Amino acid sequence: MITVRVTVVDDKISSLTVSGHAGYDVKGKDLVCAAVSGITFGLLNAADVLLSSARCTVLDNRIEISIDDPDERTELVMRTGLIQLKTVEESDPVFIKVKMEV
């Protein structure tokens, strides 16, 4: 299962971590993993280019985006990615879980 952990501080996203594997299909044919990877790498690239306070980390089977000082701009970028990830969760809740930590 893919796990998305979102930390919210003062109603703004301060971090988002994506880890795991969906297990929808074999590696290379897993459509859920492909969707999540596309969204997550797009969000990572947007955060890296557009948000000076973002710290982006790519590890083996884990992507982390941390925001040092969340503001309206960072919130717009991060919420856009979160909405997309939640859309995948709504379609395939057995394979991806979004967990909000307030």
Image (tube, helix red, strand yellow):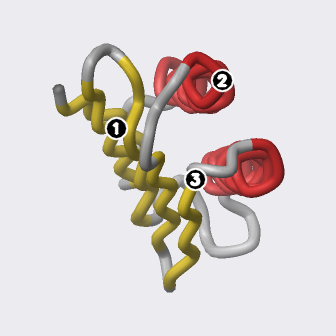
Q: Quadrant of residue 11?
A: top left
Q: Nearer the viewer, residue 4 or 74?
A: 74
Distance (Cα) linking label 2 and label 1: 17 Å
The mark nearer the N terminus, 2 or 1, is 1
Amino acid carrying label 2: it is Arg
* Residue sticking out furthest to the left: 102
- Judged by depth in the image, the label closer to the viewer, 1 or 3, is 3
The count of marks equals 3
Q: Are marks 1 and 3 in contact (CB under 8 Å)?
A: no
On screen, residue 74 versus residue 18, left or right, reads right
Tell me where residue 85 appears, x and y as whole percent.
56, 32
Residue 3 visible (yes or no): yes
At a point 52% along the width and 24% down the height, the residue shown is 71
Q: Is residue 19 above or below residue 89?
A: below
- In the image, which disc is placed on residue 54? 3
Amino acid carrying label 1: it is Val
The mark nearer the N terminus, 1 or 3, is 1
At a point 59% along the width and 61% down the height, the residue shown is 25
Image quadrant where one finds the N terminus: bottom left
- The residue wearing badge 2 is 73
Under circle 2, the secondary element is helix
The mark nearer the N terminus, 3 or 2, is 3
Residue 31 visible (yes or no): no
At a point 39% along the width and 22% down the height, the residue shown is 12
Label 2 environment density (alpha carbons within 10 Å; few <14, some 14–19, many ≥20)? few
Q: Nearer the viewer, residue 40 or 88?
A: 40
Q: Nearer the viewer, residue 47 or 71?
A: 71
